[in-house]
Image (cartoon, grey):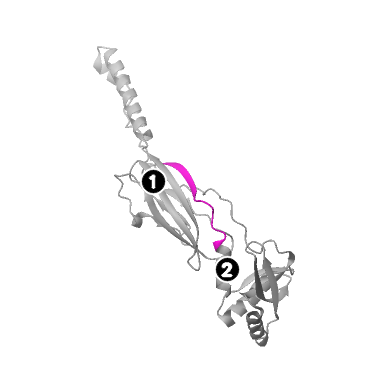
Amino acid sequence: MGIKQYITIILSLLLLAGCGKDSNEGVVGEYQSAQAEAPGDDGIFEYTWSIVQQPDASILAADDIELSNDDQTVSFIPDQTGNYELSVIVSDEFGDEISTQSFTFEIIESDEVMDDEDEFEDEYAEDTTTESTASTDFDSVLDEMPAWEPPPTIPEPKPVRKSYAPRRAPAKPVPGATIPKDPNRYTIQTSAKRTFDAAQQSAEYLMEAGFDSYIQKAYFKETDEIWYRVRVGGFESYSAAVAVATSIRNLTNGETWVDHVRLEN
């Protein structure tokens, strides 16, 4: 079993128990945004967004959705009042689905600007009517009245970008997480094999290439399985381990994984 399959097993066990779902309120014509939650700080993840629900009168299409450079954040401008729901599928670099997250938006119509304009016009009309009827001398009233000025221009509201974080769901236990480790030292895993002979072949190949490889037996309580890990070296710093892992990756064209030095179990 190669490192790709091993990582796939670990990521698959991180599948969230349910879909995170938030309900947010917005206004027609204003930007609405949502950001998917990444399963972890390390790794390459793919985000596939889709429109699950929208008002019957809405013509919002998939092409109208704006995505960030890494596809993790989505933005759109609702064109009708009502409920919108967007869903995102988070997958790992091997195409395996890790989680599904949903975001709902309750969109309403904004009448604040219209109400302000109507109130201003009503007050101005009331003032002019009172002054015109208070005196029969219309010309003198005009002379005493201040020069009329047009009402101030009310700026058009700009779209407001909003961002909502999905609710967190408890993650399932990761295989091997209970194996004791040295938090101050790092090592590199190049592969994990079912049998010792297969692991020995991989270790000998790395030794011939000049790398200090070794085999470590690991028992996973979560799945009741035994694996033979092919690992390289022991490092005091994470950056040094990453540099050597890159060299191994260039040599083997395979994946590598920097981990803490683990104790036999």
Residue plotted at (68% across, 70% down)? 218
Name above or below for residue 157 compared with residue 75.
Answer: above
> What is the residue that sits farthest to the bottom in this orientation?
208
Name above or below for residue 94 compared with residue 25.
Answer: below
**Disc 2 residue type (three-letter):** Ile
Give 76 or 130, whichever is nearer the viewer.
Answer: 76
x and y percent of residue 87 in the render?
43, 53
Q: How many marks?
A: 2
Alpha carbon separation for disc pair 2 and 1: 35 Å
- Residue 126 - label: none
Give 165 or 29, whichever is nearer the viewer.
Answer: 165
* Residue 160 visible in the shown view: no
Q: Is residue 21 magenta?
A: yes
x and y percent of residue 191 in the render?
61, 75
Give 142 or 73, whichever is nearer the viewer.
Answer: 73
Q: Is residue 140 magenta?
A: no
Task: Please identify, in this view, whether the residue under mark 2 or under mark 1 is nearer the observer.
Answer: 2
Secondary element at tag 2: helix
- Residue 7 - label: 2
**Residue matched to label 1:** 84
**Disc 1 residue type (three-letter):** Tyr
Residue plotted at (37% across, 31% down)? 116
Q: Is residue 51 left or right of residue 138?
A: right
Secondary element at tag 1: strand
x and y percent of residue 198 in the render?
62, 81
Give 182 or 245, whichever is nearer the viewer.
Answer: 182
User: Which region shows up in magenta?
Assistant: 12-26
Q: How busy is the neighbourhood of tag 1: few (under 14 within 10 Å), some, or many (20 plus)?
A: many
Residue plotted at (74% across, 66% down)? 184
Q: How busy is the neighbourhood of tag 2: few (under 14 within 10 Å), some, or many (20 plus)?
A: some
x and y percent of residue 111 in the render?
36, 34
